[in-house]
Image (cartoon, rainbow, N blue to C red):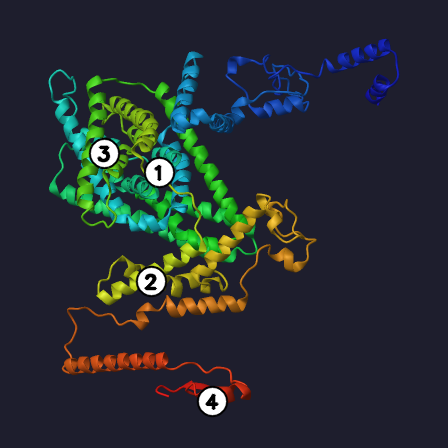
Amino acid sequence: MSVRVAFHSLTGSKSFLERGLLLLVIMIFLEGTVLTLGAASSPDISAQDNTGGGHNHLDDHRGIAGSHDHTNYTYSKKAFPVLSLDYHHIQVPFEISLWVLLASLMKLGFHLIPRLSSIVPESCLLIVVGLLVGGLIKLAGEDVPPVLDSNLFFLCLLPPIILDAGYFLPIRPFMENIGTILMFAVVGTLWNAFFVGGLLYAVCQIEGTYLSQVELLPCLLFGSIISAVDPVAVLAVFEEIHINELLHILVFGESLLNDAVTVVLYHLFEEYSGAGEVTPMDVVLGVICFLIVSLGGIAVGAIYGILAAFTSRFTSHTRVIEPLFMFVYSYMAYLSAEMFHLSGIMALIACGAVMRPYVEANISHKSHTTVKYFLKMWSSVSETLIFIFLGVATVAGPHAWNWTFVSVTVILCLVSRVIGVVGLTFIINKFRIVKLTTKDQFIVAYGGLRGAIAFSLGYLLDKDHFPMRTMFLTAIITEIFFTVFVQGMTIKPLVDLLAVKKKQEAKRSINEEIHTQFLDHLLTGIEDICGHYGHHHWKDKLNRFNKKYIKKCLIAGERYKEPQLIAFYHKMEFKQAIELVESGGGVNLPSAMPSQVSMQNIQPKKLPPPVAERALPQFTKGREEEIRKILRSNLQKTRQRLRSYNRHTLVADPFEDGWNDFILKKQRLIELEKKMTEMSNYLTVPGTVPDSPTMCRARLASGSGFKAEKGGAKVIPGM
């Protein structure tokens, strides 16, 4: 009550002296309660007897409760702390948030300077920022933490980037070039690993290099680590230069699929480095392990993708958790694959590619937008943190520099990449319809960037089994910096100099979709007629099986019956409506539709129902059924109307010659009838309007050769 009176007196219309006295009284009153920063609230036990080495809390409780047992220490009460500091309690989440904030600010500042972003790739700038941050921490006398350890990288930072790439993977160009991608990913990675590892071992045996203690298997292990193209670095650089879709999918697809080869080689050489020899049985087991790692990762990802699609059937009443199911199922696929030492990257790619068409048919548009932007945001932050952490780890980690080993590593990686791409392309072009030109080969070879995956695999090596681990890490960091800085900064000017075709940003139209489906069905029919079952045939088989069985189980309601063309039209129409509204293009919409409407309020409540339900016209039910009927009868039943045959299996018809003569005679008769009809049309003049009786009498009197007939005049030759 006294404090309230004092407060009113302080805020009232008093003189300045009275207010000062009241403020002094309040300060004296609070002097005994306010503690200094970091004051503790625990009892003061400084006066206790320390000879016993401690005391139990029961004695403290008895002393506080006023027990009659006298103790040899006193308890002094401290006031309740108003403000205290406990940084260790929130240290880990605070530092993580600080790193994310720093990474986001660096990314924001990078894109605010267009001239800088047009010259230097974003990944290069982020590595430089990491180097500066690590240098400042060292100058301050603090120990730089090992921020880029393998668990953090493989379990937290890498999955969002791979899931984003797999979920939005362009399936059509990926499947059309799957053979080329597998050649570069499997054969090319094996070539690079053995070429780099074998020649490095040969260089290490030269006198004067001081590397004679390096054995063959550790060199091959290092070659398998350094030879794999990194998907994070490829994404960071290739998305900025806007290379055409073919080259992008070749390099990026290789970076995704070579993970299985890298994992198998890494574990194989790591396992047998201690034994010192590899038997032929080990090679056979390595091949089997590669198949298990790759196909097992794909199977695990496909299973979780189907589970995610099936779960999304029942989320119509709880839309808010739809994105959660997608993220959790994807992450579980990655963890399950890593648990069995399968390819977690391939599991994420398979999971995202399998679940996307079914999940998007079940979830709402808002959930789809949430998934899209959250994945983009999450992968962007992870990519930024990876490059910053790479710079910090470069400053933090110990290094063992050997000029011979490092320089030979960089040169051999370039040479092996060029030889591998040129040699494999020579073989691949013999089977490709669209050949890879010399420019394409140069971009594919020059775009083989290394990144944080190689660094993390090198960081996983055991120091006891691999005494040269520090030198390996130094060489890996040097190769990463060379590919990211030198190749990453020069690839864009080289693309412009060579006039390499860039990506076209044109949106797909309904006309393009119709012609694409028509060509697919046409090529499928041609393969059936020729008796050659190519990828169009098997693609059509898979599509039929998907429509008949899988869609029925994984897509809710009647949407699984909707033809692909109608679904594409609805999606494109809805997207166009959103773009028109957001861009202020409401002038072309009905007058009742306001020009400024947010994405969440595309359907205003006050508008009349016919206008509010849809801003753009849509097909009626009858029109949709007519389109479905046309598509089903003319495009989707090619095989039912055409009999598959082969020129080698045709049976000779004994009446074939007679039948051919009959056909020729019939064609001649038809042509003769056409000629006779044309001649008759030439000799016959259409009837004219009947003349008046006066004109008829005048013509008869003059003998002009016309014979009056009822209904008109007809020419009579010779009269």
Q: Is residue 615 left or right of residue 428?
A: right
Residue position marked by numbered label 2 in the rendering = 521
User: Which disc is residue 700 wearing?
Assistant: 4
Residue 634 drawn at (x, y percent): 38, 68
Q: Are marks 4 and 3 in contact (CB under 8 Å)?
A: no
Residue 623 drawn at (x, y percent): 51, 67
Q: Earlier in the sequence, mark 4 or mark 3?
A: 3
Q: Is the residue 257 above or below the residue 695 in the image? A: above
Residue position marked by numbered label 3 in the rendering = 224
Q: Which of marks 2 and 4 is nearer the N terminus?
A: 2
Label 2 crowd bin: few (<14), some (14–19), many (20+), radius 10 Å: many
Label 1 crowd bin: few (<14), some (14–19), many (20+), radius 10 Å: many
Of residues 345 and 443, the one nearer the viewer is 443
Residue at x 26%, y 66% (from the top left corner) = 528
Q: Residue furthest front?
A: 702
Residue position marked by numbered label 1 in the rendering = 243
What type is the residue that disc 4 sits on? Leu
What is the C-alpha distance between the residues marked 2 and 1?
30 Å
